[in-house]
Image (tube, rainbow, N blue to C red):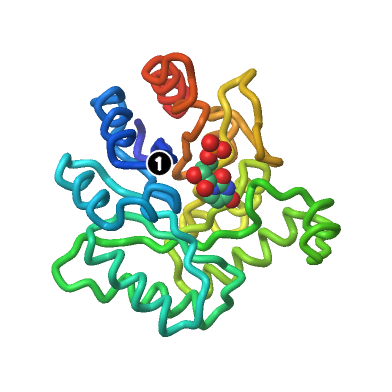
Amino acid sequence: MTPTDPAPARGIVALDVPDRAAAVALVDRLGDACDFYKVGLELFTAEGPDVVRWLRGLGKDVFLDLKFHDIPNTVRGACRSAARLGVRLATVHAYGGPAMLAAAVEGAGDQGDAHGCGILAVSVLTSHSAADLGAAVGRPVSDVREEVLRLAGLARTAGTHGLVCSGHEAAAVRAAHGDALAPLVPGVRLAGDAAHDQARVVTPEGAVAAGARYVVLGRTVTAAPDPVAAMHAARAALR
Ligand SMILES: O=c1ccn([C@@H]2O[C@H](COP(=O)(O)O)[C@@H](O)[C@H]2O)c(=O)[nH]1
C-alpha cells in the first residue's frame, strides 16, 4: 500500500443467529478468517450484552447494530452503554434527527476507560426501493440517492463516524464527504447469490469500488454451503 492508498475495507460478518450456541459454532468455524462481527437485533435480544463481552474476550471487534431511534437523552445513554461494553461501532437511525444524532455521538464519546466507539447513522435501509418507500411506508422519495445524501449531511453535521447506506449510494457519499463520513455497506452478495429481502445489493468488489470503509457480510457468507470458502472469497474481493 502506498501512502496515498485509501484504508482497506473491513469485512464484518453478521451474526444473525438465534442464540449463543449458534454464534459459537459460526465464530469457531470462521476462526482467523474473521476478526469483526456484527451483533444485531436477533442475537442481542436473545443473549444480551454477554454475547458482546464473549466476542471481545476472543479479541474480536464488535459492531452493535441495534439502530437506536428514541429521544436524545435515551439514545445518549444507550450509546454510552455501548461504548462501555467495548463495541467499536454502533448504529442509530438518521431519521432520529440532528439532536438525537448529536446526543449519540456525545454518549459514545463519554466512555471512561472504554475503547473508542464510532457512531454510524443508518440512512435508507437497503431492503427499501424508492417504490416501496412511497407506496408502503408513506415516505415518498423520488431518488434514493438524493435522500441518502440529505441524511448524510445531517450525520456529518452531528459528527458521526460514518453512514450506513447501500453500495449504490456509497460513491456519492464519498464524493460529498470524503474521509469525514465512513460508508458502511450492507446488502452485499457474492456474484450469483440470491438477494433475499434486500432491494439494493452490490458485490464485495462493487462495495469497495464505491468507497466502502466497512462491508457487512451476512447470508452470502453465513448461509453459504461452505462459509469459510465464502469468507475467503469475500476477503479476497475486499483486498
Ligand atoms: O440498511 C441496512 C442496515 C442494516 N442491515 C443489516 O445488515 C445485515 C445484512 O444481512 P444479509 O444477510 O447480508 O442480507 C443484516 O444483519 C441487517 O440487519 C441491512 O441489511 N441493511
Residue visible at 34% across and 77% down in the picture: 77
**For numbered disc 1, what is the local secondary structure?**
loop
* Residue 121, x across and y down, in percent: 51, 63
Q: Across the whole image, how many numbered discs are drawn on residues?
A: 1
Pointer 1 residue: 18
Residue visible at 49% across and 61% down in the picture: 67
Residue visible at 61% across and 54% down in the picture: 173
Q: Nearer the viewer, residue 132 or 121?
A: 132
- Assign the C terminus to one quadrant of the image: top left
Vertical arrangement, residue 173 with respect to residue 21, above or below: below
Tell me if residue 45 can be seen. yes
Q: Nearer the viewer, residue 178 or 217?
A: 217
Tell me if residue 5 can be seen. no
Label 1 packing within 10 angstroms: few (<14), some (14-19), many (20+):
some
* Left or right relative to 5: residue 188: right
Ligand 1 falls in quadrant: top right
* Left or right relative to 224: residue 18: left
Vertical arrangement, residue 102 with respect to residue 220, above or below: below
- Assign the N terminus to one quadrant of the image: top left
Q: Nearer the viewer, residue 11 or 138?
A: 138
Q: Nearer the viewer, residue 117 or 45?
A: 45
* Residue 134, x across and y down, in percent: 83, 60
* Residue 178, x across and y down, in percent: 52, 55
Beta carbon at label 1 within 8 Å of ligand 1: no
* Residue 169, x across and y down, in percent: 66, 48
Q: Which amino acid, by three-letter code, is at mark 1? A: Pro
